[in-house]
Image: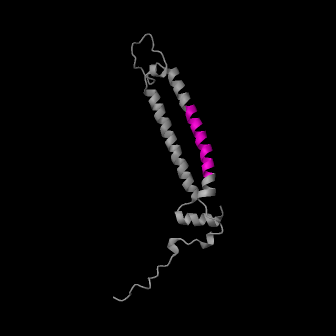
Amino acid sequence: MTQQVEALLTEHLRYTPLSLIDDIINTVNTIVYRAIEAIENGLFSMPLQQLGYSPDSDTSRDTSTLTDPEHPDATAEIENGVHQLETLLEATVDKTFDKFEIYALRNILTVDDKLVPWMRLGHYEVPFPHPCQSSSR
């Protein structure tokens, strides 16, 4: 993208094309982090039996959760799994949106260099009165 094209698009959109792409990527990353946090909260609030842990023999509670301090192994396993999922999602989003950024800048947010001199933005137009309008009052 040449400087003229970038300047034209920046003036038309009122922000640089790259900042639009960055805002999209940041929004997707925020959604990913919210989803990871929701998954982690959901796993920590589930009863241990639903997660595949057998209940302790000395307790008759069926509703013990991972937030109880007597389950450090289960807590560590969930934290490790959530961290691995987060890392996988981050890598996938980064790789996919790198491709999106290249595609958008080459094919969507661009103007052919031959058309740049012919482009006229609305705020450059001078408002002339229409010849059919009467100026007498």
Q: Which residues are magenta?
A: 83-101
Query: As drawn, is 133 to the left or to the right of 28?
Result: left
Q: Is residue 90 above or below residue 124?
A: above
The secondary structure making up most of the magenta span is helix
Q: Tell me the residue at 51%/47% (across/down).
A: 27
List x then y, in percent, for residue 41: 45, 31
Q: Is residue 136 above or below residue 111?
A: below
Q: Is residue 91 magenta?
A: yes
List x then y, in percent, for residue 124: 52, 74
In this view of the protein, which residue sits in the foreground, 67 or 32? 32
Q: Is residue 129 above or below residue 44?
A: below
Determine the image quadrant of residue 8.
Answer: bottom right
Does the image show residue 69?
A: no
Q: Is residue 124 magenta?
A: no
Q: Tell me the residue at 61%/51% (across/down).
A: 101
Determine the image quadrant of residue 118.
Answer: bottom right
In this view of the protein, which residue sits in the foreground, 127 or 23? 127
Q: Is residue 69 above or below residue 135?
A: above
User: In which quadrant will I find the C terminus?
Assistant: bottom left
Residue farthest toward the front in the current orientation of the protein: 132
User: In which quadrant will I find the N terminus?
Assistant: bottom right
List x then y, in percent, for residue 31: 49, 42
In this view of the protein, which residue sits in the foreground, 106 or 25? 106
Query: As drawn, is 102 to the left or to the right of 30?
Result: right
